[in-house]
Image: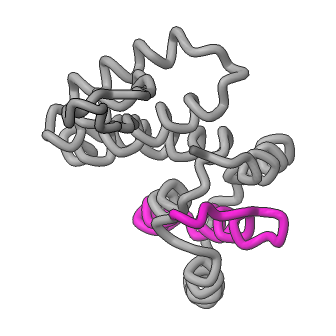
Amino acid sequence: MKSEDQNSKGTWQIIYKSEMPAYIEPANKIFRGEYLSAINDLNNLLLSTDYSDIKTLSMLHINLMQAYFKIRETNPKNSEQFMFHAKEALKYGHNTGLAPYRLIVGFEKQNKINKAIEVCEIVTADEYKFSIYGYKQKPEFIERLKKLELRNRKIQDSCLEPFCTEHERNMIIKNSNIKQE
């Protein structure tokens, strides 16, 4: 972000210029359709990011999720990758609703309704906080949860493997309360 001010001569000068986070350029590559290049850049950034920097980790994972999602049809491993990075984005506090939405739809397509329900239960918990700038909000997930529970009664999902451990669930909820800038 930059702020400009007009000096006494009537010309503009920059008085403040903030540094752009390193993940912005790879995110722009995703927007331009340069998915493989973005994935390469984001993975390199991920390797050099301190694991205490959860805000950056959240953004790296959500962008990796988006890039892999865009190319999911080209290789079955890409679907696994976008699901993995969606979960990681949630764990590191990405709380716009995009990651759980992608996970739920992905699990539904795999007929893993129990996992989709579990994701809904996590993000509809009272302790889970959505960003005010979110893609989706809690009421949408409450409705989705109701539909998933009805669907599960009809088809009886045989996948009993949980979406996440109790530790991961607690991490998702705790980190959803960290303000993302």
Residue 33: give x, y in percent of width and height. Answer: 14, 40
Residue at image point 73% right, 70% down: 121
Q: Quadrant of the N terminus?
A: top left
Residue at image point 30% right, 32% down: 7
Q: Quadrant of the C terminus?
A: top right
Of all residues shown, which one is farthest toward the top? 48
- Residue 172 lies, with reference to residue 146, above or below; the image says above
Q: Tell how many labels.
A: 0
Residue 125 forms part of the magenta stretch: yes
Query: Residue 30 occupies which quadrant of the picture?
Result: top left
Residue 161 visible at all: yes
Of all residues shown, which one is farthest toward the front? 8
Residue 124 forms part of the magenta stretch: yes
Residue 60: give x, y in percent of width and height. Answer: 47, 31
Q: Nearer the viewer, residue 112 or 143?
A: 143
Which of the colour schemes (rainbow, by chain, secondary structure, one colour) is used?
one colour
Judged left or right of residue 7, residue 156 is right
Residue at image point 58% right, 70% down: 113
Residue 152 visible at all: no
Give the overall secondary structure of the magenta segment. helix
Q: Nearer the viewer, residue 143 or 175?
A: 175
Residue at image point 33% right, 28% down: 14
Residue 150: give x, y in percent of width and height. Answer: 61, 90
Residue 34: give x, y in percent of width and height. Answer: 16, 32
The region drawn magenta spans: 104-133
Judged left or right of residue 135, residue 121 is right
